[in-house]
Image (cartoon, rainbow, N blue to C red):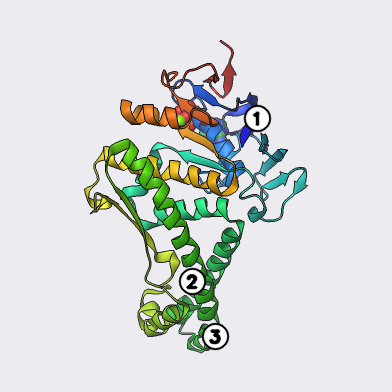
Amino acid sequence: MYIEHLSLKNFRNYEDEEFSFLPKTNILYGKNAQGKTNVLEALYLFSIGKSFRTPQDRELIRFGAEFSRAELTFSDRKRRQKIEIILRRDRKKQIKVGGVVIQKLSELVGTLNVVLFCPEELGLVKEGPHVRRRFIDIALSQLRPNYYRLLSNYHKVLDQRNHLIKKVKFQGANSLLDTLPVWDEKLAACGVEIVRYRREFIETLETYAKKVHTEISGEELGIEYRTRVTTKEDFLEKLSQNLDRELEQGCTLFGPHRDDLLLTVGGRDAKTFASQGQQRTIVLALKLAQADLLFEDTGEYPVLLLDDIMSELDAGRRAYLAKKIQDKQVIITCTDVEPNLSGEQTKTIHIRSGAILKD
Ligand SMILES: Nc1ncnc2c1ncn2[C@@H]1O[C@H](COP(=O)(O)OP(=O)(O)O)[C@@H](O)[C@H]1O
Ligand SMILES: [Mg+2]
């Protein structure tokens, strides 16, 4: 699939600007703090309905403006479609897909698929488990819209159960414990489904990522999904056996919201042993694998959004990446036009203070 056009009104530092993209390489270049990442942020917003930089939609509205409007046209093999997003300071955002207002984000996710690679993503290897769960959850939601619904459901039940546990802990509302089995049942039913989806996804992702990783570095990458709840019975048993601890800590201690990915290079735990260079290779392999998998599964290669990463990669990895993406749509930001990427099918867009500079 590819993005044809983006229009931004009062979005971040853009007052009113229009972008046309080629189906191949598009380079947004310019000095720091001019608005390059803001464009990728807008594009990403159309994919999962949320920014990758902030959970607060309000921050996306241009300083001093009351609302913001972004419009995007993309094409895939089946059709050409328009998505529109309106952000207001005092209201929930409104999203229209093909002219129709959607009620839930689950109706948007999976429509336009993008894979983002930015410097912050390097935290995927070294940071806490929630970063790796987020990666799985976004990738899986693009692939399986049902997963997104399942996950929202799980989080609702989890919030209710945590709320109940806190009430017992802080207000001594012990009688509430009678209703706990109902929540446990829901949590376990939903939870094991999530684990099943994630395991299957990780197994497939691993084959793709291993291949890319070996091609880049010659080293073997391993990805393993780590969970402490295998079956529904097991999940329910853990919950009932650890209720005292849960009441002590005031939250639910078991379930897919505590799971993690174990990443290894040459059999060693990457979290403790991987060098900066190795971390970059792992993340690159994971992201390219995510894109390959989407392609195999849906027949559409996602749009790649690369934020300022060329300078982070050495010559070998840059060349590998350039070759791998040469016939796909890529929208990339950098401070200087990247020689590895310039070619006949490349469009360069010069950005300065929230506008395209005609040069
Ligand atoms: N809501 C907003 N309204 C107006 N300007 C904003 C808003 N949010 C961020 N900016 C401005 O956007 C610029 C940063 O844009 P960014 O795309 O991150 O830059 P870069 O070109 O370095 O990627 C900064 O000048 C910042 O002040
Ligand atoms: Mg930037």
Q: Earlier in the sequence, mark 1 or mark 3?
A: 1
Q: Is 217 left, or right, of 114 in this rendering?
A: left
| Amino acid type shown at disc 1 | Glu
Which of pointers 2 and 3 indicates the residue nearer the eye? 2
Are the residues flagged by discs 2 and 3 in contact, CB closer than 8 Å?
A: no
What secondary structure is marked by label 2?
helix
Q: Which mark is residue 192?
A: 2
Which of pointers 1 and 3 indicates the residue nearer the eye? 1
At x 33%, y 36%, the residue is 216
Q: Nearer the viewer, residue 165 or 274?
A: 274
Q: Is residue 306 above or below residue 279?
A: above
Q: Which residue is mark 1?
A: 4
Residue 338, image x and y in percent? 42, 20
The CA span between labels 1 and 2 is 40 Å
Q: Earlier in the sequence, mark 1 or mark 2?
A: 1
**Local crowd size for mark 2, using a 10 Å CA cut-off: few (<14), some (14–19), many (≥20):** many
| Amino acid type shown at disc 2 | Val
Q: Which residue is mark 3?
A: 179
